């Protein structure tokens, strides 16, 4: 799957803003990588590298103390995901867009060499009171990516389905591959909600099932994704039950009330010696019966 924007953040202090931007940008048609830590697994994951390679824009959420670990000499650089992501994005000359939240006033003077160039990057001024202005400027003045068109979306879905097929064909998938499979299901389900694609809503419960299995080993890593998916799956189940109930009522009305009404019509026409009207009622009733037979045979042949 291809991404246009990568969001890097610290969970402490940066998660809410990162998630809010992800929701808004995806709703507006951007393809955004926001992993909620499901891909931050072991060494710097190849899937994260691939996503950064694909993206044009790299949004860096700078909450209070976000770069403290980067300047801590006792910290292990390879275990600092924000530093690894930022260093790789700078190496690949991505469009870095830093967003400084309340509490983050300036870049530290002693940043390490691999991320020092970030001090030259500019981003829109973040202000929660004037968020709409901030978001408008982010899209118009700082992001190089443009929202996808419907044709692009269809191609994107095709690409996701191919990736899904490839991941499902792995005989003994690792936890990282399982997480990627879950993210693919999630992305397809997100598109289903975003673009009203009921044919893809089943992907959300499949994503939830995968993350629940993975959470048995690492509950903290997948807690946020599960918390996000559970209400979506519950809401879709309620919607499905509602439409199923309405469809059942319609079917009963069609299968019972319509023939009963036609029979009443035929009897009344016969009693009034209105034989043309009676013949018309018989013809309509015969047509309804023929339709029932056709639908039953079609259903049996497809099953």
Image (spheres, rainbow, N blue to C red):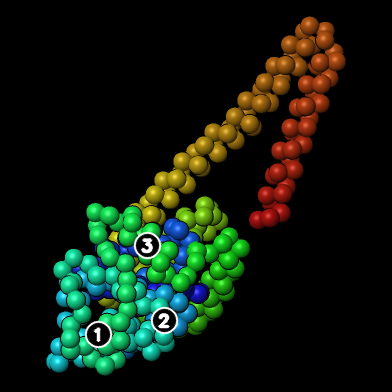
When asked about the image quadrant of residue 12, the answer is: bottom left
Left or right: residue 98 compared with residue 145: left
Compared with 209, 266 (above or below) is above
Gap between marks 3 and 1, in whole Å? 30 Å
Left or right: residue 64 compared with residue 173: left
Q: Give me the residue at 81% from left, 15% from top.
A: 277
Nearest-to-viewer mark from 1 and 2: 2
Residue 137's label in the rendered image is: 3
Q: Give me the residue at 61% from left, 63% from top.
A: 151
Gap between marks 1 and 2, in whole Å? 19 Å
Nearest-to-viewer mark from 2 and 3: 3
Q: Nearer the viewer, residue 74 or 176?
A: 74
Q: Give me the residue at 74% from left, 33% from top.
A: 289
- Marked residue nearer the N-terminal end (3 or 1): 1
Q: Nearer the viewer, residue 67 or 291?
A: 67
Percent x, y of residue 159: 56, 72
Name the residue that disc number 2 marks: 94
Gap between marks 2 and 3, in whole Å? 19 Å
Residue 80's label in the rendered image is: 1
Secondary structure found at label 3: helix
Compared with 118, 207 (above or below) is above
Q: Can residue 170 be spotted in the picture?
A: yes
Image quarter (top left, top right, bottom left or bottom right) of the C terminus: bottom right
- Marked residue nearer the N-terminal end (2 or 3): 2
Residue 130's label in the rendered image is: none
Q: Can residue 185 be spotted in the picture?
A: no
């Amino acid at each position: 799957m291809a991404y246009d924007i990568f969001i890097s953040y610290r969970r402490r202090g940066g998660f809410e803003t990162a998630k809010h931007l992800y929701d808004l940008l995806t709703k507006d048609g951007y393809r955004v990588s926001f992993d909620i830590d499901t891909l931050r697994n072991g060494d710097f994951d190849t899937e994260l590298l691939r996503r950064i390679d694909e993206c044009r824009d790299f949004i860096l959420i700078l909450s209070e103390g976000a770069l403290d670990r980067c300047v801590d000499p006792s910290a292990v650089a390879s275990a600092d995901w924000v530093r690894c992501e930022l260093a790789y994005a700078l190496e690949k000359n991505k469009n870095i867009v830093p967003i400084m939240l309340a509490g983050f006033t300036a870049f530290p003077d002693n940043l390490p060499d691999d991320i020092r160039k970030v001090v030259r990057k500019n981003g829109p001024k973040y202000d929660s009171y004037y968020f709409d202005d901030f978001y408008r400027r982010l899209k118009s003045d700082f992001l190089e990516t443009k929202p996808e068109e419907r044709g692009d979306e269809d191609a994107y879905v095709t690409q996701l389905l191919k990736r899904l097929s490839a991941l499902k064909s792995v005989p003994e998938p690792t936890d990282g591959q399982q997480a990627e499979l879950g993210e693919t299901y999630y992305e397809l389900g997100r598109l289903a909600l975003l673009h009203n694609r009921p044919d893809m809503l089943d992907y959300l419960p499949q994503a939830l099932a995968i993350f629940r299995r993975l959470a048995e080993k690492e509950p903290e890593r997948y807690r946020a994704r599960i918390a996000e998916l559970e209400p979506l799956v519950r809401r879709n189940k309620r919607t499905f039950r509602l439409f199923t109930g309405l469809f059942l009522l319609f079917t009963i009305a069609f299968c019972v009330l319509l023939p009963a009404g036609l029979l009443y019509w035929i009897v009344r026409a016969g009693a009034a010696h209105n034989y043309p009207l009676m013949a018309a009622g018989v013809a309509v009733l015969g047509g309804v019966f023929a339709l029932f037979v056709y639908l039953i045979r079609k259903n049996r042949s497809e099953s």
